[in-house]
Image (spheres, rainbow, N blue to C red):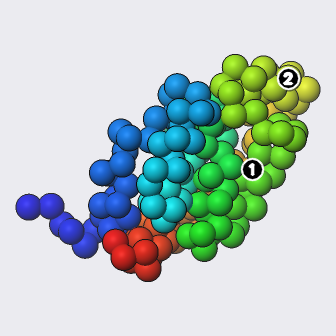
Amino acid sequence: MADTHSPGRRYWALVEPVWRSINIYDGPDVFLTGFRAVRPEVGHLFTAHWCQSEVRNGGFHQFFSNSTGVLAPEALAGFRAIGSAQWADILAEAVALFGDPYPRDRADRLDRLDRLMAANRGRRKNRGPFYALDDRFYHRLHAEPDRWEQAADAYAASAGG
């Protein structure tokens, strides 16, 4: 039997049932339709989970270049709702690099991302404009064990999960 008290279990119990119903792969309209159909608290956890997971795996470049980039504005709201203001601030800086309005459409986002990377060639490890933001995000993530899971679980508990 799985440990129901392990970090991340509480928030995942809210996210897992909607995991396939919120479609991030077929464009902004499809994503927003699915996102708006779930409780706001669940949506906050879903989007913040995707963001931290992608950044943890491959940095902000990966987050924005993949389909997950469609949900950046909602992940920003999710981090704020969860009480992770520092992650929200870091994500806000990354989102701002794309200009206003933020390009939810993946092709548009990839075009802007290519321009950002070209304008920032020669930066450390060729990670472009996200190098320092990635480091700040990772530092916050690893400042204590299971930091994301604890924050998400506490928010889930407050949301009745």
Tag 1 residue: 133
Q: Position of residue 63 (x, y in %)?
A: 61, 38
- Near-viewer residue (69 or 121): 69
Considering every residue shown, the one lying at the far bottom of the view is 158
- Near-viewer residue (132 or 158): 158
Quick check: 108 left or right of 150? right
Q: Residue at x 25, y 73 (%)?
A: 5
Q: Position of residue 47 (x, y in %)?
A: 53, 51
Q: Amino acid at mark 1?
A: Leu
Q: Residue at x 30, y 61 (%)?
A: 13
- Near-viewer residue (82 or 122): 82
Considering every residue shown, the one lying at the far right of the view is 119
Quick check: 41 left or right of 61? left
The picture quadrant where one finds residue 120 is top right
Quadrant holding the C terminus: bottom left
Instruction: Report if residue 45 is visible in the image.
Output: no
- Near-viewer residue (17 or 138): 17
Q: Position of residue 86 (x, y in %)?
A: 70, 67
Tell me the SS state at disc 2.
helix
Mark 1 Cα shell of 10 Å, populated few (<14), some (14-19), many (≥20): some
Q: Amino acid at mark 2?
A: Arg
Q: Residue at x 80, y 33 (%)?
A: 128
Tag 2 residue: 115
Q: Tell me how many marks there are.
A: 2
Instruction: Report if residue 14 is visible in the image.
Output: yes
Quick check: 76 left or right of 89? left
